[in-house]
Image: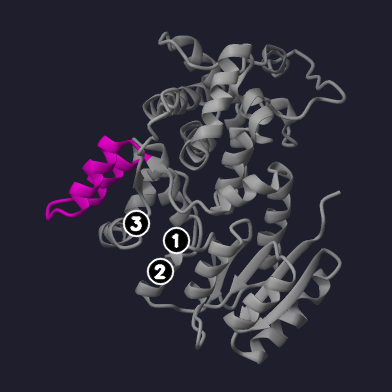
Amino acid sequence: MEERLRVLFVDDEIKVLDGLRRMLRPMRHAWDVAFALGGLEALRMMQSAPFDVVVSDMRMPRMNGVELLREVKRRYPQTVRIVLSGQASRETVLQAVGPSHLYLPKPCAPNDLKAAMDRLCVLRTVLQAPRLRGVVGDVESLPSLPALYGSLMAKVGGLNSTAESLGAIVAGDVGMSAKVLHMVNTSFFGSSGRTVDPVKAVKFLGLETLKALALTARIFDSYDPPADAQCLDIDHVCRHSLDVAAGARDIAMSRGADAEAAEYAFVGGLLHDVGKLVLMAKLPTEYGQAVALSRTEAIPLAQAERQVLGANHAEVGAYLIGLWGLPGSIIEVLAFHHCPRMSKEPPSRASALTAVHIADAQATLADRRERPYVTTPLDEDYVKSLEPGVEAATPAGSPAPV
């Protein structure tokens, strides 16, 4: 059974901490909560016992929130890092983008805080390998196609760039798209709503903010493969993801999805293999071993990943996107795109998950280039069960996602 979530709240004002104690008292049955008066005390407490989550104010003396979260990231990358702060300067927010996963405004409603913690509890069941939680927790940016990264950096440094032109570049790259959606779907820049459209996300952030994020916060990164990573191909991952995104949107619309649901299918398809980018960037040697195992043993890559790493790219990607605050339906797509019947969401023939699962299989069949690994096949029984007049059936005791 998963252990109770251990959460450490950090602020330099005792009255704020007392208020949090009172507000969180009804949650004491669900979480183990502790309070630290300032960053230095927080680090001392973390030396004595680990915490799953650190929630920190920004404006504190001696050690501010950014400095604290950077140190937590360095020492305890598996710890989820959340900013809980009132109005902060643009410069402070830009500094906080790297070491933090989420930004919650202060004052924070109890239900909003509870929702954030409940979400983390669910994510811990999605990715159960502690080591990989640390790997994902250390991620600040995802690798991008070198050519697109070069084009974006040239444009943000130029005088004639527009939000539209930058948005077009971002939307063509999986890593960049994921990061701008991270920025918009938290409260870093005062977003009162959410979007899963990378182009809309760039427009919301605005030209100057995106330039600052790219040049100052360095939220984007070009992929620089190690010398022995011949079987790891970021170009293929990105091309495949774009194909799946377009296909999933068409499939969802052909099955009666509305415009919003079709947009979720598109972005779910675009991000469905984000976990591969994480593993390629952070664990290239082990990931190369998984790719080789898939080829030599003729087993699906997700199964080979589990054998080598203890989890697969679907779980890794879902955990990261969940940490970054994207909607739950996108997390479902990432987590279960190989095994849709494992999702707890009611099955639907027009859902983003169904559309991405089908589009992923179709894009794989259409891709005639030699693959260095074996792919997971279409779950034909699942797809057929969702057709009108066919009774849906989910076998009892279904295996864990692979």
Q: CA distance from mark 1 to mark 2?
A: 7 Å
Query: Does residue 281 lie above or below 391 as drawn?
Result: below
Residue 157 lies, in percent from the top left, at 18, 55
Q: Secondary structure at mark 2?
A: helix
**Mark identifier at residue 98:** 1
Give the amino acid type for the residue marked by disc 1 in the picture: Gly
- Which residue position is annotated with label 2? 95
- Which residue position is annotated with label 3? 218
Give the amino acid type for the residue marked by disc 3 in the picture: Arg
Range of residues picked out in magenta: 144-170
Residue 376 lies, in percent from the top left, at 61, 18
Asked whether 158 falls inside the magenta stretch, the response is yes
Q: CA distance from mark 3 to mark 1?
A: 8 Å
Query: Does residue 227 lie above or below 215 as drawn?
Result: above
Q: Is residue 174 visible?
A: yes
Residue 136 lies, in percent from the top left, at 57, 48
Q: Is residue 302 left or right of residue 276?
A: right
Give the amino acid type for the residue marked by disc 2 in the picture: Gln
